[in-house]
Amino acid sequence: MRLDDATFPWFGSRSGMENEGVVLSREGFAALLRALREDGYRLVGPTVRDGAIVYDTIGGIADLPEGWTEVQERGRYRLERRTDRALFGFAVGPESFKRSFFAPTVSLWRARRKDGSFVVLDRAAEMPRVALIGARACDLHAIAIQDRVLLEGPAVDPSYAARRRGAFVVALNCGTAGGTCFCVSMGTGPKAASGFDLALTELFDGEDHRFLVQVASPEGAAILARVPHGEAQKTDLEAAERVVQNTASQMGRSLDTTGIKELLYRNLDHPRWDDVADRCLACANCTLVCPTCFCSTVEDVTDLDGEHAERVQRWDSCFTLDHSYVHGGSVRPSTKSRYRQWLTHKLASWIDQFGTSGCVGCGRCVTWCPVGIDITEEVAAIRSTEKG
């Protein structure tokens, strides 16, 4: 099942003010980041750390991965220098913006002993407003999926809601496809369609480094009005369209989504599950880098003298044995059953639960699998046995 605008009716509210006639220079983009900081936003964008491009708090344009790109294949990732000064000349790193809203660790409550009883400590804290810088189309769709699960469902996650509230999104239309990307197959990119305040396309013409800007919200228009910018020319619009078309033609992977839910439901006992289980380490890397996975667990901890106690929510994974534990044992004791659960939920039963696929085609699970298991290859192998 492909994803498109119709799939996300709750995600298109910032799409009624489209304006594709504004250009920012490199200096104008730096001024835009300064304006967001002046308004109290914490900037979260790409930066180089520990041999990868990750999303973290940035101060401005100097923290962006200027002149860096990535080489990705299944089980492989490395950084390489580009021949230009592109600020966003890469695809996606190991992290998504998921951790900005669905935090890896959240304190649910804390208590301390007082007068023979316990007093619950106030954990309410003002969450700083976040501005996402350089959000790709696949990650915007992933945020929409998590909104549907954690914000728009019958049980709202209060921590997620507090972090998500007031977020400002600067999207970036992809100019580089990774070796494991397949967003075109999923209908999630490489061009951002909705869910942003401003969308940029990075352009080069010799030494001229500029950004074509699309405005999609009053907040985006207000910020843009405070920084120097100019009207776009026809050549700018054409250049931006070529960037997106070139990226779409360079996908490193593809996935046939025709009838994929029914395909997987018909093949729960397919021998391919045994084959992949022989390779899978059940390390949970794929779920940790996935921008839509939302499994969590709750732990109660106390100090040694019994004076303080705390309940903590942490990220978990359906690949861990304890995640499916109920009284008497684990529901999914084998690696085979846990991999089948993950892939079938992501591409099939997720559709029944939430009305959309749980995969946005970012390719992170392929890149960061230590043994190079490829989700597109596994589906193709199952599908091939039905073609006679």
Image (tube, helix red, strand yellow):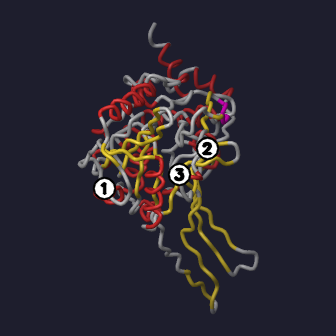
Rounded to the nearest angstrom, the CA distance separating label 2 from label 1 is 29 Å
Q: Element at badge 2? A: strand
Indicate which label's residue lies in the foreground, 2 or 1. Answer: 1
Q: Residue 265: horizontal and vertical position, in percent?
A: 44, 28
Work out whether mark 1 precedes mark 3 in sequence or the reverse, and give the earlier one.
3
32 and 218: which one is in front?
32
Occupied quadrant, residue 183: top left
Q: Which residue is mark 3?
A: 45
Q: CA distance from mark 1 to mark 3?
A: 20 Å
Specify whether residue 38 is painted magenta.
no
Tell me the amino acid under the disc marked 1: Ala
Give the structural element (helix, strand or loop) at label 1: helix
Look at the image and say whether residue 78 sits in the magenta stretch. yes
Please report the bounds of the magenta region as a residue range.
Answer: 75-80
Q: Give the residue pinned by disc 1.
A: 221
Per the rendering, the mark at residue 53 is 2
Q: Amino acid at mark 3?
A: Gly
